[in-house]
Image: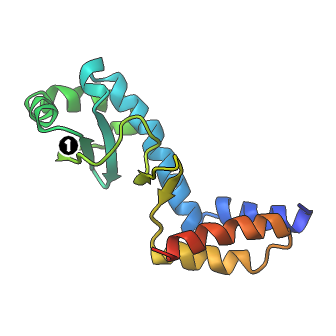
Amino acid sequence: MNLTDDLIINNILFNKYNTLSKLCNHAQKLMLLDKVLKSHLSDDIAAHCRIGNIKDNFIVIETDRSEYLTQLKFNSLELLSSLRKHPSFMHIASLKFKVSPEFNTNSINYRANKTESNTINIELSQDVIDTFSNAIKDIKDKQLKEALMRIINNDNAK
């Protein structure tokens, strides 16, 4: 890879006005806040929960089974009070809960489907595909360009 390619990749990933960069930053933020959330939960519940989203002044907490949802709702006032002591959660006014049985608590926090060949298929939105397509046009490194094209082509093949 040459310097131009490095600059293009850095611009894609770290430019605060770039859509892909915003998505990456939001995902990183959710992963960090998820660790904080889990530190405020008992181990048996934490293994089945994650932060689904954080928006304005509320957090969406997802769990894979309804019995954990019931426990979370029952303890929501204590949990909210405990979370507000952490600087990242001071502005949170409420918690929302959602059962999402399809999420795999042992995987990274994105929606992915494992295939029989043990690969992971990530579902990309059309906006992400368009952003990737536009960025790929300027990349000079042949291997990187081909790898990124495979990501887009595999997603478009669905």
**Label 1 Cα neighbours within 10 Å, binned few <14 / some 14-19 / many ≥20:** some
Q: Residue at x 39, y 36 (%)?
A: 34
Three-letter amino acid code of the residue under disc 1:
Leu
> Where is residue 45, by image quadrant?
top left
How are the colours assigned in the image? rainbow
Q: Residue at x 45, y 72 (%)?
A: 125
Q: Is residue 65 left or right of residue 130?
A: left
Residue 84 percent location from the top left of the image = 29, 32
Which residue is most to the top? Answer: 43
> Where is residue 101, by image quadrant?
top left
Residue 131 percent location from the top left of the image = 59, 76
Q: Is residue 42 visible?
A: no
| Label 1 sits on residue | 95
| Residue 147 position (above or below residue 26) | below
Q: Is residue 109 left or right of residue 7?
A: left
> Where is residue 21, by image quadrant?
bottom right
Give the position of the N terminus as an image quadrant.
Answer: bottom right
Q: Residue at x 30, y 23 (%)?
A: 40
Q: Residue at x 92, y 63 (%)?
A: 2
